[in-house]
Image: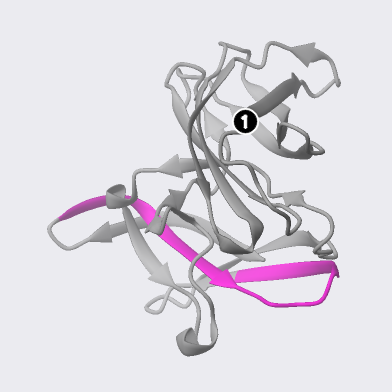
Amino acid sequence: CALFARGGAVVAGGDARGLSFYGTFRVPAGRYTVKLLVQNGESGEAGAQLMDVTVPPQDPRVGFLLPPVVMEQGAEWLPLDMDQHKDDRGPSPFHVAGKPFLPRATFQINGVNREKLVLIAWEPGRAQDPASGIEIQSSLMDAKEQAVPAGMIRIDKVNREEGGRRTYVLDYTPDRLAAGDYTLRIGVGESGEARLESYALLRFRDLAHP
């Protein structure tokens, strides 16, 4: 499971929007609580955050879809690698056709700008038809579990890799909604295959109060 978070940071020669970091953990399937601790080396002040993580069992006969993430502009962030044993780990999961990208730590949008979403799926090992059609369905629910307009989602590109991984890059134009938290559900599948589904917490912010 890959974890990432951000905080304010300033770099030499200019300002950065924040600090971006992630680490990779290889653990058996189950439920875990991850604690992130950040400490100021000069003042000694520290802050912590707890996150509950569920790692599902992986069955090569059954595909699964990771929650959608928003592709950020990496040049605006200061990167920090948390992995201590780089030689023992695999490549970063956040890449499209071998080119790394920076995921936004929170799915926060303003309902005005078009966003780039990335879906990462693993399919069971079987022969694939590169010309098969792709179907994507989405829905958006508010905090009261009422359906609201999800906005327009369009497929930009699809990258197929060995091992059954597929990376979908989507253009997402959300509708204008009231500030608050919503649940975005996405289902994706290709002709003749079972549809894979995942969801993410989508947070609309008020443009007057960023």
- Measuring from the top left, give residue 126's x and y in whole percent: 73, 55
Write down the residue under mark 1.
203
Asked if residue 19 is among those painted magenta in the image, a careful observer would answer: yes
Residue positioned 74% across, 21% down in the render: 139
- Measuring from the top left, give residue 31's x and y in whole percent: 86, 66
Q: How is the image coloured?
A: one colour
Asked if residue 122 is among those painted magenta in the image, a careful observer would answer: no
Residue 25 in the image: above or below residue 208: below
Q: Main secondary structure of the magenta part?
A: strand
In the drawing, does residue 48 fall left or right of residue 82?
right
Residue positioned 61% across, 19% down in the render: 179
Q: Pointer 1: residues within 10 angstroms few (<14), some, or many (20+)? A: some
Look at the numbered disc 1 and give the secondary structure of its residue.
strand
Q: Amino acid at mark 1?
A: Arg
Span of residues in magenta = 14-36
Residue positioned 83% across, 55% down in the render: 62
Q: Nearer the viewer, residue 5 or 90?
A: 90
Residue 134 in the image: above or below residue 27: above
Residue positioned 40% across, 59% down in the render: 98
Residue 29 in the image: above or below residue 139: below
Q: Tell me how many marks there are.
A: 1
In the drawing, does residue 38 fall left or right of residue 203?
left
- Measuring from the top left, give residue 26's x and y in whole percent: 69, 77
- Measuring from the top left, give residue 73's x and y in whole percent: 34, 44
